[in-house]
Amino acid sequence: MSTSLRRLNRLLVTFVLMAAIVAGSGIGVSAAAAPAAPKDSPKSAMPEPGWPESHLPESDPKPGEPGYLESRPTVVLPPDGWNDAEFEAHDPHGYAAMLPERRRVERDLLTKVRAELRRQGIVRTTGGRLSSTDAARAASVIAATTYSPYGYLKFTLVPNTTSPYARNGYLGTLYFTYGIYSAVVDAYKWYTVSWPARSGNNRPADQSKVNLGPIPAYTWDFGFMYGAWRGYEADGRVEFYPGKWRLDPWTGGPYGRSYLEVHGGTGAHTFAATSGCIRIYPAAISALKSYYDTKMANKKDPGSAHLTVRY
Amino acid sequence: MAVLVGAAGIGGCSGPVADGEAGPPAEVSDGFDVSSLTWDPDLVAANTPGLVGWQRSGPADPGTLVALSPEGGAVTPLWSAPDAEGVSCVPHAVDGESRRMLLEVLRADGVGPAGTSLVMLGADGASTVLVPPEGYEGISSATFVGGRALVVVNHATPSTFDTLIGMYSDEGVWQEVPLRGTVPDHQFVEWVVAVPGTDVFAVLLKTPGRTGDRDDDALVLARLTDGGLLVHTDGFPDDSLPGASPLHGVEGVVYPRTWRVVDGSPVVDLVRARWTGTDWEEQVVLEAGAIASGIETGQVSAQDSDGVLWVRSAAEGAGSPVLLSLDPAIVGAEPMPTALAMDSIDWFTWVDADGR
């Protein structure tokens, strides 16, 4: 592509994006509890060459092109993550930080699950038990919902000076937590997996600084763009390998942050700094995809397919 | 094919993998044989001394080694990466004297981790696959010393990241090259690069940093002595050093400093760090310049044998970044734009002439 054509393409992309922002304002902003984006965004830095063009869908490798990677379904179930006891033993601070949100999520889920079972005429005895027939029916009913397995993600930056994955005094961690409902005991059992991660300069105090700081604290819709589900997107480019999930709001996020993703990167980009995207190792992307494919029935629900970022 | 399968099996993952997680692809099935790569070193010799870069015109482009002509903006193809599904290449070093190139070949199947092979394209036009030592699956850096590859390999787990420096013999046998002397406390080696025109190597160490801007990384210089890298400098600290490239004929590096903020917005300074023999001399050669930070592009600057710095500009509006020239010997010099568009150039370096 010639330089002039590339310029024209960028202008068109900018125009399309602006149009999309106007048309889609409000769409894709997820939880009601999420903080409102400040109206006055700080002046952004001089744009980095390749940013944000490399992150736009228009730049994705197309089928048949050498940079294209086909997204393949997960055929082997991943191993169970840590149960709560194992999670607490391995990562007590992460576990403690996860619990308050988990309790809220679980309360909400149980309310929905019980309502759905009642609606289907599945009722417990006074002792709280289900007949074996009703237990089987309940499993079938729940399998048709987005309530189990129910998954969500969390990204944290916590002070750390000892881990080799810490940068700027903070260790980034990406958690995937999923719960599986058992109708027999009327409860969820939770599992968690985690990977080292980094975002921007890794310094939470800089989250408002465009192109410099980490992804802002917010509740992002994982695998969505302008409110539409896109899921996992395989990407063979070295900056993203082996793939990515876009985060909504795709544009107009807190502090004017835009075009943020969870992606990999290989070669010189392996666990390298980003302009704000969350980067994990390529192997971690592949592992996360296997859990995303098989342990997240709610992945297409923008009301619950969340990546929460809290500092 | 046997070489490729072996390389993928040993070096097949690129990050921390817990027990039971997805591992490297068990076998290679598409018929691409990394050991079959060939090139024409005469083409490089005919275009050097000069700037050489790695061009990808778009996501569909597997990449081409090109000669860069800043004056006229010409880009001359020297070698093209194989157009094979899931295969991408990352150049590490080109040595005009030994007529060799070090190339990392990444093999993606879209499911498992990328298989990584380090390949040396030789003066005879053929390739040699350099197999990493057992237990190390990733390539952190590769540079030349006397025509041989000096490589940093890594092994990552969810809680550890271990690196090892080593050199390959002409027969492709790995031999560890330990760091010796007074070495700053560090967690691992980020990279090692030869400083052209000198006998020293720049070694970047990841240090156990805190929230400051100058405590995550430290640069030392070392000489290859008795099978080890003997460090002869103090540590020079800066969190921006991962984006550094070596100076030419001077013991030091140049890098974009990305952590300074002015009026709430980050700025990029171009910084030169030189070892005087007793101390580090730090000089901001371009303050708050309209230059790239390198975070997305990975490569910002290189110095040629005349001391001129070649720098990637920042993009302005919808414009393309271009290559800038800057003479650091002239106090207060402003970078001069060249005709060379840089939006398709990932990596670039200065290559001296064929030494024969």
Image (cartoon, rainbow, N blue to C red):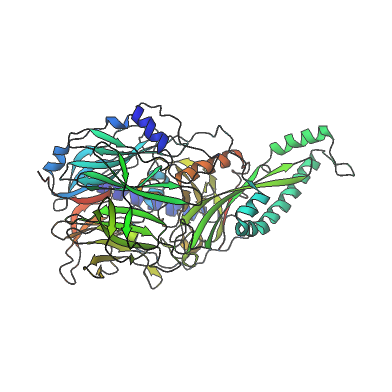
Single out the residue that lies furthest toward the bottom: B263
Q: Nearer the viewer, residue A26 or B18?
A: B18
Image mark count? 0
Q: Position of residue A273 (x, y in %)?
A: 40, 56
Q: Quadrant of the C terminus of chain B?
A: top left
Q: Is residue B128 above or below residue B148?
A: above
Q: Position of residue A47 (x, y in %)?
A: 35, 59
Q: Is residue A173 left or right of residue B234?
A: right
**Residue that appears at 32% across and 62% down:** B219
The image quadrant of residue B108 is: top left
Q: Is residue B288 left or right of residue A132?
A: left
Single out the residue that lies furthest toward the left: B356
Q: Position of residue A41 (x, y in %)?
A: 46, 66
Q: Quadrant of the N terminus of chain B?
A: top left
Q: Is residue A225 above or below residue B110?
A: below
Whether residue A49 is visible here, answered yes or no, is no
Whether residue A50 is visible here, answered yes or no, is yes
Single out the residue that lies furthest toward the right: A126
Q: Is residue A96 above or below residue B158?
A: below
**Residue that appears at 25% across and 34% down:** B127
The image quadrant of residue B126 is: top left
Q: Position of residue B142 (x, y in %)?
A: 29, 47
The image quadrant of residue B354 is: top left
**Residue that appears at 63% across and 51% down:** A87
